[in-house]
Amino acid sequence: MRLTLMKEDGILTARLSGELDQHSAAQVRRELDRALGDPSVKRIEFDMKEVSFMDSAGIGVILGRYRTVSGRGGSMGIGNAPRNVERILRMSGVYTLATERSMR
Amino acid sequence: MKNELRTSFSSLTQNEALARGVAAQFCMLFDPTVEELSDVRTAVSEAVTNAVIHGYGHRNGVVGLDLVKEDDLLTVTVRDEGRGIEDIELARRPFYTSMPEAERSGMGFAVMEAFMDSVEVESEVGRGTTVTMKKRFGRNG
Ligand SMILES: Nc1ncnc2c1ncn2[C@@H]1O[C@H](COP(=O)(O)OP(=O)(O)OP(=O)(O)O)[C@@H](O)[C@H]1O
Ligand SMILES: [Mg+2]
């Protein structure tokens, strides 16, 4: 799993690439939490375009980061998920927590 | 004609990708759709992760993954000899997890059920857990 992070205007954009499972979740969590250590980050956006596989371990990662940003009054966005990833995201209900960028 | 593949591997999270790969490769025998293949990969990943983190709790152990093809029917069995499940009905409930503090979402069994035709769980506390999942291929043409 490769992670590309960008920070701009209090928005952390995380572009994930590869397979997000229990094994890669630990690394993703660590890198995201390091970036979220900056209290000026008020919104996290997950770009799922390059995620080739994800299971419920990935949902745990997303929900955990959502908790962090919402705890400081922030918001979350999720976009570009391929079909197989989209199905599991929908099942989990995380989309109901996500908002469009303009609503941050 | 019946065709079987029986494997066992160390209970390490790094073997999840391997288990998915083996299952996907076996499924090529069914001439699967992209979606069918992804269903099986995801369900296998959920069951194997559970065996590693819940069954063995990261202790050393052996996870069994058996794949059987009978015509268009796939049977996948994931087996551990770990701690077992006390209340299977509770464990299978969507969003139930015994490890909320570890950022688990409790979706594993729900995902297996959604992506496979049937999921059967047998477990004995202190003895281990066996998850048997079935899927019929070629449903959508
Ligand atoms: N092989 C197993 N051995 C022991 N307990 C298990 C096993 N598989 C599942 N369980 C129990 O069943 C519960 C539900 O499993 P499920 O996969 O649905 O959720 P989870 O693993 O807790 O979270 P998630 O899969 O979303 O990361 C687990 O929390 C665990 O207590
Ligand atoms: Mg699970």
Image (cartoon, rainbow, N blue to C red):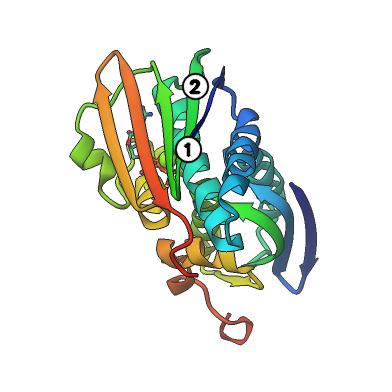
Question: Is residue A24 depicted above or below B55 in this figure?
Answer: below
- Circle 1: is it few (<14), some (14-19), or many (20+) Cα within 10 Å? few
Front in this rendered view, residue B87 or A75: B87
Disc 1 on helix, strand or loop?
loop
Can you tell which mark lies on residue B49?
A: none
Ligand 1 lies in quarter: top left
Residue B34, given in percent of the width and then of the height, sits at 61, 61
**The C terminus of chain A lies in which quarter of the figure?**
bottom right
Confirm or deny contact between disc 1 and disc 2 (CB under 8 A): no
Q: Residue at x 41, y 50 (%)?
A: B135
Residue B25 visible in rendering: yes
**Would residue B52 be found to the left or right of residue B131 on screen?**
right
Q: Is residue B98 left or right of residue B17?
A: left
Reply above or below: B25 against B87. Answer: below
Q: Which mark is residue B63?
A: 2
Residue B124 at x, y percent in the picture: 24, 20
Q: Residue at x 34, y 27 (%)?
A: B130
Q: Amino acid at mark 1?
A: Met
**Front label number (1 vs 2):** 1
Residue with the mark numbered 1: B1
What residue sits 53% from the left and 57% below the top? B36
Count how many numbered circles sit on residues in the image.
Answer: 2
- Are the residues flagged by discs 1 and 2 from a single subunit? yes
**Does B107 sit above or below residue B22?**
below
Indicate the amino acid at tag 2. Val
Judged left or right of residue A40, residue A94 is left
Chain-order first, disc 1 or disc 2: 1
Res A23 visible: no
Toward the front, the furthest residue is: B1
In the current view of this chain or complex, which residue is farthest to the bottom?
Answer: A102
- Specify few, some or many for label 2: CA neighbours under 10 Å numbering under 14, 14-19, or 20 or more: many
> Could you say where residue B64 lies in the image, as x and y percent from the top left?
48, 22
